[in-house]
Every structure is written in C-alpha cells, then in structure tokens.
Image (cartoon, grey):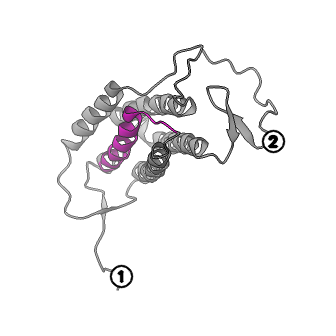
Amino acid sequence: MVVLNRIYTRTGDNGTTALGTGERRPKFDLRIDAYGTVDETNSVIGLARLHTAAAEPLVDAMLGRIQNDLFDLGADLCTPDTGKPLDYEPLRIIPAQVERIEREIDLLNEELKPLRSFVLPGGSAAAAYLHQARTVSRRAERLMVELASRPEEKVGDAALRYVNRLSDFLFVASRYVNRRGEGDVLWVPGATR
C-alpha cells in the first residue's frame, strides 16, 4: 500500500530520483523518461474522460481500467529487473492485461466501418484527446523499446506488448467516440496543393 503523507522530500533537489529498487538515477535517465511519458499518457486520457464520462460510458469504463494499468506499467518500469532479490514482489504488467485490451479493441472495432483513408486527429473533443493520448503513448513505446535495446536494461515483454496495443486501442476508441466513425476527419492526400 502506498502512503503519501509528505509530497516533497527534497531528495530530488540534486537532479536525481529513486527507482523502486532504491537506486538513484538522473531525472533525464531513459528509464525515468519512459515511465514519465507513460504518466503523461495517463494525464491525457484523464482529459479525454472529461468528455466520455457521460457520453460514452462503455469507452469511459475501458479508459478507467487503462488508467489503472498505466500506473501498473509505471510501477513495472520504475522497478527494473536487476536479478537481485527485493524485499517485495514488484508489480509487473501481465499477459492478461494485454489480452483484455485486445478484447476491448475488438469490441469497439466491431461497430466501425473499415477505413478508406487515414484519419486526422479531431472530430469531437473526446476523439481529439484520444488521438493526443495515442501519440503520447507511441512516444512512451519508442522510449521503452529503446530502453529494452540496452543490454543492461530489461523491460518485460508483456509491458512492451501492452504499450503497443494501447495506441491501437486509443485509435479505435477515438473513431468509436466520433459517432462510430461517422465523425472522423479523413485525410485527403494533396488536398491543399
């Protein structure tokens, strides 16, 4: 259980922050950047939920679960697997979370017509925020993949699959909240030449 009785600790005043293992790293460290960008994704999803709570309860419930998953993902990334024993069992993204998000993508996608063009971010406010969350999640994914490519760093396979599916979910959800795709703003190649 997390207990936050003091918000500032002053321990980061020197430009470092602590991982879940207790190790301190510079705040610009790639691992910190990765889970910070996961947190940024979560914040944008919170903005989207301002527009889905009443209008799209099915999508809103899915987004609520995803926000919780993103805290799990942040905890996973914050506690690197160093091979050394810890005093606790670290929280990890598990395959069941990936499978759930895949089922939810499929459920929403069933009501959408196939695309004949790329979709421009926009339409409704909810869709615009979901597109923004999608692009931020793609940045988180790029950072996680770069982190995983380093021999001294480990990122779980389920975590990488989850963040990859997340951007797919956010894309499908953006179309779903855009009147089931009818409100999508389609790209017209060369239209402004």
Using the rendered image of the protein, determine whether residue 33 is visible from the camera's viewpoint: yes
Q: What percent of the width, then of the height, locates residue 145?
A: 44, 47
Q: What residue is disc 1 on?
A: 192
Specify the quadrant of the image occupied by residue 92: top left
As drawn, 69 above or below 49: above
Mark 2 residue type: Asn
Residue at x 26%, y 48% (from the top left corner): 180
Local crowd size for mark 1, using a 10 Å CA cut-off: few (<14), some (14–19), many (≥20): few
The residue at the far bottom in this view is 193
Of 177 and 89, the residue lying toward us:
89
SS under mark 2: loop
Q: What percent of the width, then of the height, locates residue 115?
A: 20, 58
Q: What percent of the width, then of the height, locates residue 48?
A: 47, 44
Using the rendered image of the protein, determine whether residue 55 is visible from the camera's viewpoint: no
Specify the quadrant of the image occupied by residue 173: top left
Q: What residue is disc 2 on?
A: 14
Residue at x 28%, y 75% (from the top left corner): 189
**Gap in Å between the C-alphas at discs 2 and 1?**
50 Å
As drawn, 191 above or below 115: below
Of 156 and 125, the residue lying toward us:
156
Residue range of the region highlighted in magenta in the rendering = 153-175
Q: What percent of the width, then of the height, locates residue 150?
A: 49, 45
